[in-house]
Structures are given as structure tokens and as C-alpha cells.
């Protein structure tokens, strides 16, 4: 029998109701946190929120840290004493630069070349300390290490003593050296954690940082090729030092500097140090980003005291916070002034900078009156 108009319209009405319900449930993703305002996320931000799992490495000991904050992000057996191999040479360079001038002339002696010299240093050659540092840190020449230690210290034993004094000053209790080049020795040991500290110290030395960032260089009429292949293959790599011996296995301390952050890693005893290090560095850049906070001398960073005089305020040190990459755009800052006395004490906080992340307070940092120039 034929359908009445009301019977025909019912299926159409139900379909329209169903479509309207579906259309309200598939809008852009929204984050909510209690009474905080709703914030819509783009699809790429949602994808970025996925945490990449820690990688599986061949290295039995390693560490991954943020170079600026020093925050350790991944680690395994990081305090286990192991042979550091030629990563030892970072301390050789640090002590040499602390104790001597770069233009110091060094004549190579027979005892210097009793170890293998990848740059074929020969008895009687005269080089500057700076040239020897290039050979020490780029192609990792062992004879250069001996020559530096002997010339700067008067003898190798004295210089190695200075090396041990140096790491003791850094507070490193699991590091000890028996030679300046890193050959295996029961008394030549360090840890992934200690080598990360040494690596940070080395990269804060302008001379060392300048040398170890170079994939190639020329010194004393020789072409030098770095043993650190990351300098040519991993974007942002700026150092620092390889090491390999039978006992140590493959070792590498690496530093990468990108706009998202500075990642520092150390692998020891690896079967493939560059593969392992890439995994660690990729984990850093997939999961973390540095947030830099500073207050420049602008009108926005001023306040009026009780007598209506203007004062500029600042952070005594710029602030760096490690966050998830997708959180960077959710940061907000609020400047709170607590003390409006006409003569503020520059040594006492006058308020605080409140940094919020995605609607929640992340940290408070003291504000001080900016010193007058």
C-alpha cells in the first residue's frame, strides 16, 4: 500500500538528526584542564604529543643529557668505570691550555713517537702547541698527546698528575688517568657520566670547541680528517671526541646544537658508536625542546614605584626549561611586582616572573632591579 507523507519524512528526519550528531563529534582535537580555557590543536601537534620510546643501544653504558640545563634524559650504567680510550685526550687538551700558551714551541722527541702516530710525527720536528692540539683532537694522534704532556709538564708523569688533579677539581670520583692518550691501562678509567661532565667542560673552552667542530683542517702542512663522522652526517653536530681500543670498544662523546636545543651524549663500549649516538640524539629531538626565557631592557619590563619613578627589572640569568616540542607554543609569562619602594635594594627581589605552561604554573623566577650603567 502507498506510504503517507508522514511515513516518508520519518527516515529523512532520522538521517538528518544522525548527521547533525556526527558533525559535532569530529571537530579539531581540544585540550581541557578543569576550568582552563579550551585550546584547539592542529593534527601535527597531536602527532607530536606521542612519546617516542627509548632506543635499544649496543653500548652497555651511555648517557643523554641537555647540555644547557644539565638534565639527564636517558642513562644506563652511567657510573660504571670503563676504559675511555681517546676521550682521555679532552682532559689532555684542557690541562695543556690551562698550563701553557698555544704558541709554545714543541720539538718532537724519540720518546714521544714510541706510540703510534696517525699523522706520522717524526723526531726533530718543531710544532706549536696549537698545531699539536689540532692533531690531538681531530685525527686523535697519540704521539701528539705524548709530546704535549712531556713538553708542558716537563715529563709525562707530572702532566698526568695534573690531569688527575683537574678531574678531582670537577668533583669526579670515578675518573683516573694513567697516560695522556687513552691507551688501555687498569688505572685509566672513567664513566659515561664523568665523560659527559668533561665534555661539557671541554666545549666551554673556546679553543677546544673551535677545533673539535671541524671535519677537516690543516696543521703543520698536514691534512687532518676528524674521526667523528657525525660532523659531516648529523645536522647540528659540533663535536666532540671519539675513542677506540680493544678493552674500551667504541666510544663517543657527542654534542649537537640546533634551535630546539643542545643535546649531549656519551656512549662507551659500543659496537657501533655512530649508530648508537644517532639513536640517542634522535630521541632527544623527537621528545624534547629547550624553552629560553629572558627579559630584555624594554618598556615592557619596567614598573613604577610609590613615587611614580620608573625602574627596569631583569632576570640575573636567562632561564632555560626543557619541555615537550608541542608545548613550546603554550607558554605564557606574568610579571608580578611585590616591592614598589622608591629605593629598591638591587640585591633583593622586587617580584617574580611566573612562567606557565599550557595553563599551569611551571616555575617562578625572582625579578631584580636592573643595575644602572
Image (cartoon, rainbow, N blue to C red):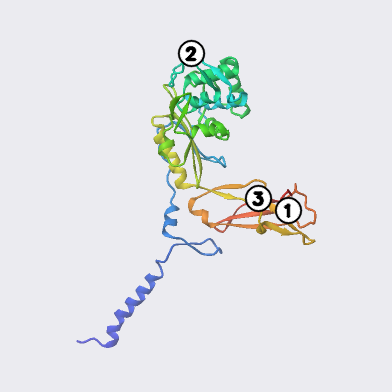
The reply to whether callout 3 and callout 2 are in contact (CB within 8 Å) is: no
Q: Residue at x 39, y 29 (%)?
A: 271
Residues at marks 1 and 2, CA–CA distance in whole angstroms: 65 Å
| Distance of label 1 from label 3 (alpha carbons) | 11 Å
Q: Secondary structure at mark 3?
A: strand
SS for dot 1: loop
Rendered view: 337 above or below 216: below
Quadrant occupied by the N terminus: bottom left
Is residue 175 visible in the rendered structure shown here?
no
Q: Would you say the residues marked 1 and 2 are in contact, meaning their CB atoms lie under 8 Å apart?
A: no
Is 348 positioned to the left or the right of 208 in the image? right
Label 3: how many residues lie within 10 Å, few (<14), some (14-19) or many (20+)? some
From mark 3 to mark 2, how far is it between C-alphas? 58 Å
Quarter occupied by residue 277: top left
Residue 93 position, x and y percent, is 55, 26
Identify the mark at residue 365; answer none if there is no mark: 3
Task: Residue at the far top: name it.
Answer: 110
Of the two numbered discs 1 and 2 on the same chain, state the one appearing first in sequence: 2
Amino acid at each position: 500500500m502507498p506510504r503517507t507523507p508522514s511515513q516518508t519524512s520519518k527516515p529523512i528526519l532520522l538521517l538528518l538528526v544522525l548527521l547533525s550528531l556526527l558533525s559535532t563529534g569530529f571537530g579539531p582535537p581540544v585540550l581541557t584542564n578543569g576550568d582552563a580555557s579550551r585550546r584547539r590543536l592542529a593534527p601535527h601537534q597531536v602527532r607530536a604529543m606521542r612519546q617516542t620510546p627509548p632506543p635499544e643501544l649496543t653500548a652497555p653504558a651511555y648517557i643523554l643529557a641537555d647540555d644547557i640545563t644539565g638534565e639527564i634524559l636517558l642513562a644506563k650504567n652511567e657510573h660504571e668505570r670503563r676504559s675511555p680510550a681517546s676521550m682521555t685526550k679532552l682532559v689532555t687538551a684542557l690541562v695543556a691550555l690551562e698550563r701553557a700558551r698555544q704558541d709554545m714551541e714543541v720539538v718532537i722527541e724519540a720518546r714521544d713517537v714510541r706510540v703510534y702516530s696517525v699523522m706520522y710525527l717524526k723526531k726533530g720536528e718543531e710544532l706549536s702547541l696549537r698545531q699539536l692540539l689540532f692533531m690531538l683532537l681531530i685525527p686523535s694522534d697519540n704521539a701528539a698527546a705524548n709530546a704535549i704532556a712531556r713538553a708542558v709538564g716537563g715529563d709525562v708523569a707530572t702532566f698526568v698528575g695534573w690531569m688527575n688533579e683537574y678531574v678531582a677539581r670537577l668533583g669526579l670520583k670515578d675518573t683516573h688517568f694513567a697516560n695522556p692518550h687513552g691507551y688501555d691501562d687498569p688505572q685509566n678509567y672513567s664513566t659515561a657520566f664523568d665523560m659527559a661532565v668533561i665534555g661539557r667542560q671541554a666545549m666551554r673552552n673556546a679553543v677546544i670547541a673551535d677545533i673539535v667542530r671541524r671535519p677537516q683542517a690543516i696543521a703543520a702542512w698536514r691534512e687532518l680528517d676528524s674521526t667523528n663522522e657525525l660532523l659531516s652526517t648529523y645536522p647540528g653536530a659540533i663535536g666532540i671526541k671519539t675513542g677506540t681500543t680493544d678493552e674500551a670498544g667504541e666510544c663517543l662523546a657527542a654534542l649537537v646544537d640546533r634551535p630546539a636545543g643542545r643535546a649531549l651524549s656519551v656512549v662507551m663500549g659500543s659496537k657501533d658508536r655512530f649508530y648508537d649516538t644517532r639513536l640517542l640524539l634522535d630521541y632527544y629531538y623527537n621528545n624534547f625542546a629547550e624553552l629560553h626565557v629572558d627579559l630584555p631592557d624594554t618598556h615592557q619590563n619596567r614598573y613604577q614605584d610609590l613615587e611614580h619613578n620608573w625602574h627596569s627589572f631583569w632576570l640575573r640569568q636567562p632561564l632555560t626549561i626543557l619541555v615537550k616540542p608541542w608545548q613550546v607554543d603554550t607558554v605564557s609569562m606574568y610579571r608580578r611586582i611585590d616591592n614598589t619602594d622608591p629605593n629598591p635594594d638591587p640585591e633583593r627581589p622586587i617580584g617574580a616572573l611566573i612562567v606557565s605552561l599550557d595553563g599551569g604554573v611551571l616555575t617562578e623566577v625572582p625579578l631584580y632591579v636592573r643595575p644602572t650603567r
